[in-house]
Image: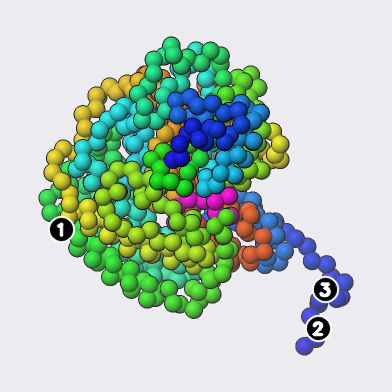
Amino acid sequence: MGDFITEADGLETQEFILNLGPQHPSTHGVYRARLIMDGEIVVSAENKIGYLHRGIEKIAEGITYAQFTPYTTRFDYVSGAMQPWAWCLALEKLGNTVVPERAEYLRVIVGELQRIASHLVMLGSMVLDFSAITPWTYVFNAREEILDLLEAVSGSRLLVNYFVNGGVNADIPEGWAAKTEAALDGMLKRLDDFERMVSGNEIFLGRTKGIAPVSAAEAIEYGITGASLRASGVDFDMRRDSPYSVYDRFSFAVPVIKGGDSFDRYQLRVLEIRESVKIVRQALKTLPDGEVRAKVAKVWRPAPGEAYAATEAARGIMGYQVVSDGSTKPYRVHMRSPSFCNIGIIPAKAPGLTLQDFISFIASLDFVLGDIDR
Amino acid sequence: MRDIAILAAAVPGAEIKDGILLVRADRIVAALEALKKLGDFILFDISAVDRPAKAAPTAAAPGVAATSVAEVAAPEPCFELSYRLLDMKEKAKDFLTVRVILDHEAPSVPSVIGVWKSADVLEREVWDLMGVEFIGREKLGRILLRDDFVGHPLRKDFVMPKRERFLSPAWDRKAAEGGL
């Protein structure tokens, strides 16, 4: 044709600002990235967060310890059941409460089921960002069955208030263990189907392989934790290396991948689901009898002091600092949320990516805005 | 976690108190650099506690029975700033806490962003909610709150403002004109 205008004709190109979000389906919530673009290429990125900030640390100072427990499920609403774990551990340290063994096992079972459900959401929504709708229906179908199990033990599906200071809320209903085994079988079958559709798919590989590789040194430097850290080749999992609860009684592998690109972060979650299934099965097999809740006073006043506890939540290390002044209300509560720290690397890795690769990058980091903004 | 006495020996000017490394505020960068040199640490949390004049005192470290109030009573109002490090070298049951005590009037501390980049978002959060200044770094803007927010809400002297209406100026005009 020959009549295209090119830069050789004296036409200058210009960088422009692009606001990705806060109302964009690919940002998985009210996350906004302020991108400076050169055509299709990201020149710089800035995280804009806080749209969902509810001041929960401040709210905690005005209510009692027990009243705050349900709030903890509201941060990372995709893995609600395992969110109060670190909070309860901190309270148990503060009050020197010994959790009954059966309760510890039930926590592990429910926590790992929730981790599976959370990773399934990540897998589904990541491929959904690449416009693949069918695989998404497969994993959400599998997740439904797990949510049914959580509903059976706690009464709620999404914001599961099962963990309490001193144990768990209630024992599992009759026949629940068998149902869980069956649901896990069904889930694994669906996961296999999902993998057959996605893991070797040329479009998926093209969108994820080699995108935003994070080296082990970078991951440590930026304080990334959880699956994204292990996808960068750092062999660290709190469940194995700093075992809380009864994790040291189960044998499970900690999958580690060296590459650190978007595909590896995806692949690692698939591997982790299979390991979580092993943990749940072992825990169900060896579930001891007994109480599920230690005796904790209704009006609970821990001695003045401070406790810090952390757990390996679905997205990384979830930590709670609880400071008591001896009254019924916490003096100060600080939470370290994994998503908040994991997105710190986005401005460093975004330059040079195309916009579609940027979407692939943030989808693979798997953050939840309730967890970031608190 | 590695033995805290050995760690304390490697950190210039650190003293151990209730299983916590206490460091003077102007030495925090050197302290964290020394720890980073030892290897296998991740800085994964920074948090501040406001302790105005009549505050409850700090007590024991996690898992340890709390000591009596008189023993640990903070003599002066202060901000406690805690850096939490994860020891990846040895099978740990706990985390290393490095703590600095800051002046209550004008809390400020050198930024450790040059040591660990993970400090970036964490320091911004502490400034945003608690108002602790970090010196030697560029942007300390609001991160969770609105840009025009006044004050630092997690301070104990923060007075909760009356419930604000988050509506558009056009809506406000309409309300002022009695159109609602």
Gap in Å between the C-alphas at discs 2 and 1? 71 Å
Q: Is residue A141 left or right of residue A121?
A: left
Disc assigned to residue B160: none
Specify the amino acid type for callout 2.
Asp
Residue shown at 58% from the left, 34% from the top: B11
Nearest to the eye among marks 1 and 3: give it.
1
Relative image position of residue A335 (x, y in whole percent): 46, 37
Gap in Å between the C-alphas at discs 1 and 3? 68 Å
Residue shown at 19% from the left, 43% from the top: A102
Specify the amino acid type for callout 3.
Glu
Which residue is disc 2 drawn over?
Answer: A3
Task: Tell me the chain of label 3.
Answer: A
Relative image position of residue A168 (x, y in whole percent): 24, 39
Sequence order check, earlier mark of 1 and 3: 3
Which residue is disc 3 drawn over?
Answer: A7
Label 2 secondary element: loop
Which residue is disc 1 drawn over?
Answer: A178
